[in-house]
Image (cartoon, rainbow, N blue to C red):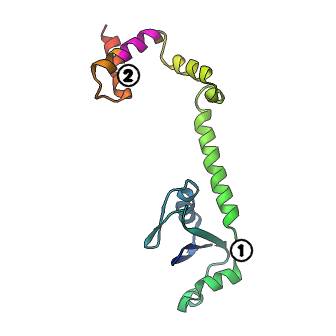
Amino acid sequence: MFHVEMRQFPHNFCSFNIGDDELRAIVDPWVRDRPVDFGERRWSPLEARMKILEGPELSLQQLSMGRGWQAAQRTSEDVTDRVIAAATQAMVSAGAQTQGAMPGSAAINDPLAFGFQIASLLGSEPMRLLEAWRDAAAGSPSLTPSQTLALAEHNLASD
């Protein structure tokens, strides 16, 4: 079980007996520097502090009269750094897997290699598609790039 405390002067909120899924719903946006809705407030990782304790489930008697956080501290271990590090690593790994799905993703830092990757996605006649894309963009400036690309592909298919 996990017990979580959020602090941002003058506010604080504690939640007790949280499972893995509930904790993940708090920590995942936190490590992405996104606000977290927790309790009746929205907590920003840039302004608030979070503490995560792992320990036994606390009974209702231990939580009464505002004694919950002290009871959690006595019987639990502070795992904030470990949980944040694991969530950050999972986020980085997920990003690497997403990039890894793209052929030659290691070359993204090299502009020339990146250009070749994009050209390889344009099919067997990249210059023809590029010209049609430019024409579609010039003829329809209100469309998004993806819409003008679709229009260019449609125009090439109808030729």
Q: Which residues are magenta?
A: 127-134
Q: How far apart in space, not on screen, are marks 1 and 2 (Cα)? A: 55 Å
| Mark 2 surroundings within 10 Å by alpha-carbon count, few (fewer than 14), some (14 through 19), many (20 or more) | many
Q: Position of residue 55 (x, y in %)?
A: 68, 75
Residue on which the image places disc 2: 149
84 or 2: nearer the eye? Answer: 84
Q: What type of secondary structure mainly makes up the magenta span? A: helix
| Above or below: residue 128 compared with residue 152 | above
Type of the residue with mark 2: Leu
Counting the numbered discs, the total is 2
> Considering the numbered disc 1 on the image, is that residue within a helix, a strand or a loop?
strand
Task: Say above or below: 26 vs 142.
Answer: below
Residue occupying the point 38% across, 27% down: 145
Q: Residue furthest top?
A: 159
Kindly tell me whether residue 68 is visible in this rendering: yes
Indicate the quadrant where residue 120 lies: top right
Q: Quadrant of residue 155?
A: top left
Judging depth in this view, the residue of 81 and 157 nearest the camera is: 81
Say what amino acid the circle numbered 1 marks: Glu
As drawn, the label of residue 158 is none
SS at mark 2 in the image: helix
Q: Are marks 1 and 2 in contact (CB under 8 Å)?
A: no
Q: Which mark is residue 77?
A: 1
Residue 133's spot in the image, x, y percent? 38, 17
In magenta segment, residue 159: no
Q: In the rendered view of the protein, which quadrant contains the C terminus?
A: top left
